[in-house]
Image: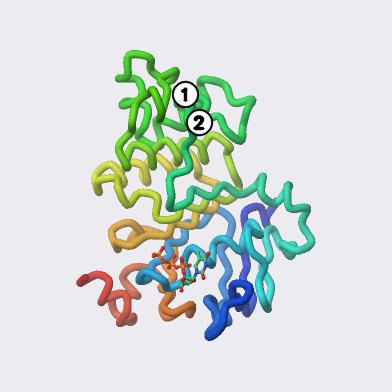
Amino acid sequence: SLSKGKIEFENVSFSYKGAVGDPVIKNFSFTCLPGQTVGIIGSTGAGKSSLIQLIPRFYDVTSGAIRVNDIDVKDWDVKELREKIAVVPQKNILFTGTVIENIRWGKEDATFEEIADASKVAEAHDFISAFPEGYETRLGQGGVNLSGGQKQRVSIARALVRKPEILILDDCTSAVDVATESRIKESLKRYAENTTCLLIAQRISSVMDADQIIVLENGEMVGYGHHEELLKSCKVYQEILQS
Ligand code: M5T
């Protein structure tokens, strides 16, 4: 359908329960069209993670509305909603078990081919294959300890194997070098061509080729556009570039 993967924020404000002071997200409106890649950038504490957690309803908006595929998230069956959305969180969420168990988590019927394909896109296939036991390698206790960047790539493979309509990467390539990150993004374009991608990042290079970039500061959108536009018009964006 035409609205598959569409996300709309309408005058969304959000405060964590019991929090005093200013809301974490303030009167935020935005439409992300199906298949678009949208970068979200802003300094630490700007509200980027809080913002994206509202989409799969990990938290509910305080006021305003969020619609996924033209339907208010409050009217979705939460399980169905979450099946459409894959979030790769900032913090590594791998468990003690084999690599393949970790990637298959959330999509138990994934075939080996699907798992290997997703891992290739996430630039994880080569290092996994280099282990003597390959995808059967145990992670964590009594097994292999992956580097921070390797863990992030396995987490991305886990999200991709689910073939979500909406893919949210929350600063999950921070420990991956720029060249590898750039290859992942290139492969993603093909693999997730019709997938809506939200890409939270700290560095400009991570979002500069996105269709649209949101600049967030203190819970407010202070810039919106593509890289060239923001370079000219958005002071906060220029500052991030120089930092
Ligand atoms: C925005 C507060 C946080 C900050 C603001 C996740 C979380 C955040 N906060 C809470 O009170 N409780 C929570 O569970 O909300 O934080 P954020 O959304 O994490 O911002 P960010 O993603 O832009 O920051 P970073 O550092 O991940 O780039 O006041 O205390």
Name the residue furthest bottom.
21
Q: Is residue 7 left or right of residue 239?
A: right
- Name the secondary structure under disc 2: helix
Q: Quadrant of residue 199?
A: bottom left
Measuring from the top left, give residue 75's x and y in whole percent.
79, 61
Measuring from the top left, give residue 73's x and y in whole percent.
72, 62
Find out if the beta carbon at label 1 lies less than 8 Å from the nearest ligand 1 atom.
no
Amino acid type indicated by mark 2: Asn
Checking the image for residue 237, the label placed there is none
Q: Quadrant of residue 163?
A: top right
Circle 2 residues within 10 Å: few <14, some 14–19, many ≥20: many
* Tag 1 residue: 98
Q: Is residue 166 left or right of residue 209?
A: right
- Name the secondary structure under disc 1: strand
Amino acid type indicated by mark 1: Thr
Tell me if residue 205 comes above or below residue 217 in the rendering: above
Q: Work out which quarter of the rendered image holds the C terminus and state it.
A: bottom left
Tell me if residue 23 comes above or below residue 191 in the rendering: below
Q: Which residue is drawn at the image coordinates 78% and 53% (left, top)? A: 77
Checking the image for residue 102, the label placed there is 2
Q: Quadrant of residue 233?
A: bottom left
Measuring from the top left, give residue 237's x and y in whole percent.
31, 75
Measuring from the top left, give residue 197's x and y in whole percent.
50, 53
